[in-house]
Image: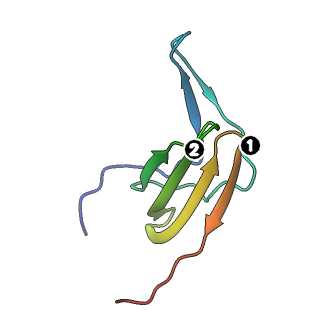
Amino acid sequence: MGIDMDEGALGDLRRFDTTTGTWSVLAADNAPKPRSFHAMASAPTRGAAGTLYIFGGCLPGHRRESDLHEYDIATKVWRQLPTTTTAR
């Protein structure tokens, strides 16, 4: 069912250095499960490097998630945020 895009779940986080034009892998504590088809956004933080947010996606076995995680760029730590399954 659906369109098979041969997409696999990935669990890496990379940083692009605009000065050198190179990518590097960021090691991170407590990273979310590898996934594909998720949404990600960034938000600036006053006086700090900022925060990344990742929402949902597909886990291996085509299991869909609706979890929310935040990544503190300065400390390189992931934290799962509370979510609800209650419809409004």
Q: Are marks 1 and 2 in contact (CB under 8 Å)?
A: no
Expressed as whole percent of the image width and height from the top left, the position of residue 39 reads 40, 54
Expressed as whole percent of the image width and height from the top left, the position of residue 43 reads 49, 46
- For mark 1, does the 10 Å Cα neighbourhood hold few (<14), some (14 to 19), or many (20 or more) residues? few
Q: Of callouts 1 and 2, which one flags the residue occurring earlier in the amino acid sequence?
A: 2
Expressed as whole percent of the image width and height from the top left, the position of residue 82 reads 59, 75
Q: Is residue 37 left or right of residue 84?
A: left
Q: Residue furthest left?
A: 2
Q: Residue at x 64, y 41 (%)?
A: 73
Classify 33 as above or below 87: above
Quadrant for residue 20, please give it.
top right
How far apart are the alpha carbons under marks 1 and 2? 13 Å
Q: In which quarter of the image is the N terminus?
A: bottom left
Q: Which mark is residue 75?
A: 1
Quadrant for residue 76, please give it.
top right
| Total marks placed | 2
Q: Which amino acid does label 2 sit on?
A: Thr
Nearer to me, 32 or 4:
32
Q: Is residue 73 left or right of residue 21?
A: right
Q: Quadrant of the C terminus?
A: bottom left
Q: Residue at x 43, y 90 (%)?
A: 86
Q: Which residue is drawn at 53% across and 77% down?
A: 83
Instruction: Check disc 2 and report the residue beneath it.
Output: 45
